[in-house]
C-alpha cells in the first residue's frame, strides 16, 4: 500500500467537512425564511454527500511490474533485491499508518456508539421506574416519571411517552399543550429520525459539522412541532408559550439528556428558545419555495465546486503520442518467434536509424534508466510511470538522457535508438503496461 492510498480519502474527508460547514452556514441563513422545515437539514446532509457519490480517486503504485522479469533469468532478479526491500519497507510504513488510523477510527466509533447505547439503556431503565398512566382516549404507551424533566418521546420500534412528576400539577390547558406537542412528535416520528442522525454522528465523528447540523435539525423539528400543534389542536398561543416556560422552569434536575428531542430540550440555547417563543406568538410567513430553490442552487454549486477541486487530485488519462516520427514496425504485440524462444512478444518493435531521438509517449516519472536493473535482454532501458496505472518501457537504447526520478513531459527526449541487449539490429522495443500487465501499445499509443 502506497501513501497515496491514504492521501486520496483524507482529501475527500477534508473537503466533505468543509462543505458541511459551508452548508451549515447556508442553512442558518435560509431558516429565517422557514424555521419549521426539518427537511431542509436532511437536504443539506444529502447535498454534502452528492459530490462524493461514486467517486474513486485511485492511487497507483510506482513499483516495477514483475511481468518485466523473465523467470528463467533468476540471477537478474537479485540485482533488484535492495530496491525491492526498500519499496517493501515504504509500503510497510504506509500499511502501518493505515492500520493505526483504522484502529483510531474504530476505537472512537465504538466508544461513541457504546456511550449512545448506554444512554439509551439509561433512558429505558428510567422508564421502568415510572408509573403507567392512561392519556384520555389516546392509545399511547405513557409513564409518569418520579423526577422533574422535560416530557419526551423515546423508542425505536414502539414509541413511549414519558411525563414528569409535575405534569399533574399543571393547569389542564397546559397539560393539553404539553401532551399534544408530544403526540405530534410521535406522528412525525421525530425521535426515531433524530436517533438515526445521532448514530450517523457517532459513525462520522470526525466531521464536527454533523453535530451542529443535528442541533439545527432539532430546532427545526421543535419549530415544526410547535406550528403543527397550534394548528391541529387549536391551542391558544399564549397558553402554549406559558406551558413551554413552565416546563422549562421545572426542568431543573440532573437528568441526562438523551438522543430524542424533548419539549423543552436543555440542548437548545437561549437564543433558540427566544426564537421559538417569537414563532409561537408571531410566526414568520414561511417561504418553502425559496428554500427549495436555494437547496437546488446549493446542490449544483457544491457538485461543481467539489468536482473542480477534486479534478486537481483525480488522475487523468495520459496524453499519449508516438515516441519517434519515422519508423516501421517489424514485430507486433503477441508475435511468436524462435528468436524469443517461441514466447509471445511483449511489445512492438519500431525500426529506425540508430541514434534517432526517442521521446516519452506521455508525461510521467522515470523509474528505471540504466542497463542493469531489468534483464540483460533489454539492454539500455528506460521505464516511465504515467497516470492511471500506465507505464511505458523503451528498450535497446544507444544512449540514455534521463535519470531515475526525473519528471518528463510528453515528447521529452529520453535517449536515442540503438541495438543494446539481445537484438538482431537497431530498433526501439516499446512496451506499455497497465496495472503491471502488458497491453498492446497500438491500442494505447497512436502509431502510424
Image: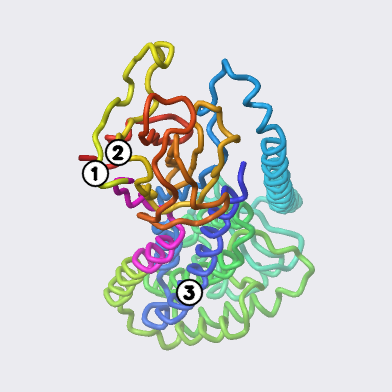
Looking at the picture, how far across and down is residue 408, in whole percent?
A: 45, 56
Kindly identify which residue carries mark 1. 326
Q: Nearer the viewer, residue 340 or 18?
A: 340
> Callout 2: few (<14), some (14-19), or many (20+) C-alpha neighbours within 10 Å?
many
Looking at the picture, how far across and down is residue 344, in whole percent?
A: 38, 18
- Marks 2 and 1 in Cβ contact (< 8 Å): yes
Q: Residue drawn at (43%, 82%), measured in percent from left and top?
A: 29
* Left or right placement of residue 99 versus residue 227 in this view: right
Q: Is residue 271 visible?
A: yes
Looking at the picture, how far across and down is residue 120, in whole percent?
A: 69, 51
* Left or right placement of residue 249 versus residue 429 in this view: right
Rendered image quadrant of residue 255: bottom right
Q: What secondary structure is marked by label 3?
A: helix
* Left or right placement of residue 45 versus residue 141 in this view: left
Q: Which mark is residue 352?
A: 2
Kindly identify which residue carries mark 3. 22
3D distance between C-alphas at marks 1 and 3: 56 Å
Please provide the residue range marked out in magenta: 302-323
3D distance between C-alphas at marks 2 and 3: 59 Å
Rendered image quadrant of residue 285: bottom left
Q: Quadrant of the C terminus?
A: top left
Q: Residue drawn at (55%, 49%), measured in percent from left and top?
A: 159
Amino acid at each position: 500500500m502506497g501513501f497515496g492510498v491514504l492521501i486520496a480519502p483524507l482529501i475527500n474527508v477534508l473537503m466533505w467537512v468543509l462543505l458541511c460547514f459551508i452548508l451549515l452556514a447556508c442553512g442558518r441563513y435560509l431558516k429565517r425564511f422557514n424555521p419549521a422545515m426539518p427537511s431542509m437539514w436532511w437536504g443539506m446532509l444529502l447535498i454534502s454527500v452528492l459530490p462524493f457519490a461514486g467517486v474513486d480517486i485511485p492511487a497507483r503504485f510506482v513499483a516495477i511490474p514483475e511481468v518485466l522479469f523473465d523467470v528463467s533469468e533468476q540471477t537478474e532478479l537479485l540485482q533488484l533485491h535492495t530496491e525491492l526491500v526498500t519499496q517493501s519497507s515504504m509500503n510497510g510504513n504506509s500499511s502501518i499508518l493505515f492500520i493505526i488510523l483504522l484502529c483510531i477510527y474504530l476505537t472512537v466509533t465504538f466508544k461513541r456508539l457504546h456511550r449512545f447505547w448506554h444512554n439509551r439503556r439509561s433512558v429505558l431503565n428510567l422508564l421502568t421506574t415510572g408509573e403507567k398512566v392512561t392519556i384520555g382516549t389516546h392509545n399511547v404507551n405513557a409513564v409518569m416519571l418520579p423526577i422533574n424533566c422535560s416530557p419526551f418521546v423515546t423508542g425505536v420500534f414502539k414509541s413511549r411517552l414519558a411525563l414528569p412528576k409535575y405534569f399533574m400539577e399543571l393547569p389542564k390547558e397546559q397539560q393539553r399543550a404539553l401532551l399534544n406537542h408530544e403526540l405530534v412528535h410521535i406522528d412525525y416520528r421525530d425521535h426515531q429520525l433524530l436517533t438515526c442522525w445521532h448514530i450517523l454522528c457517532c459513525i462520522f465523528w470526525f466531521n464536527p459539522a454533523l453535530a451542529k447540523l443535528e442541533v439545527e435539525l432539532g430546532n427545526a423539528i421543535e419549530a415544526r412541532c410547535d406550528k403543527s400543534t397550534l394548528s391541529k389542536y387549536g391551542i391558544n398561543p399564549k397558553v402554549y408559550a406559558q406551558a413551554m416556560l413552565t416546563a422549562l422552569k421545572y426542568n431543573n434536575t440532573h437528568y441526562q439528556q438523551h438522543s430524542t428531542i424533548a419539549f423543552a430540550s436543555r440542548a437548545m440555547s437561549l437564543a433558540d428558545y427566544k426564537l421559538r417563543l417569537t414563532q409561537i406568538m408571531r410566526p414568520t410567513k414561511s417561504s418553502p419555495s425559496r428554500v427549495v430553490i436555494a437547496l437546488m442552487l446549493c446542490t449544483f454549486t457544491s457538485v461543481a465546486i467539489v468536482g473542480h477541486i477534486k479534478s486537481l487530485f483525480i488522475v487523468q488519462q495520459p496524453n499519449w503520442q508516438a515516441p519517434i516520427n519515422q519508423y516501421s514496425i517489424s514485430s507486433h504485440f503477441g508475435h511468436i518467434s524462435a528468436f524469443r524462444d517461441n514466447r509471445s512478444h511483449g511489445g512492438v518493435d519500431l525500426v529506425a536509424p540508430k541514434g534517432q531521438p526517442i521521446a516519452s509517449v506521455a508525461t510521467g516519472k522515470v523509474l528505471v534508466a540504466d542497463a542493469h536493473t531489468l534483464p540483460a535482454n533489454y539492454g539500455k532501458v528506460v521505464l516511465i510511470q504515467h497516470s492511471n496505472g500506465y507505464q511505458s518501457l523503451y528498450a535497446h537504447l544507444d544512449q540514455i538522457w534521463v535519470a531515475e526520478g526525473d519528471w518528463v513531459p510528453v515528447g521529452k527526449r529520453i535517449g536515442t535508438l540503438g541495438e543494446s541487449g539481445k537484438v538482431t539490429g537497431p530498433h526501439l522495443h516499446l512496451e506499455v503496461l497497465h496495472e503491471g500487465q502488458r497491453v498492446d501499445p497500438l491500442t494505447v499509443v497512436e502509431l502510424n
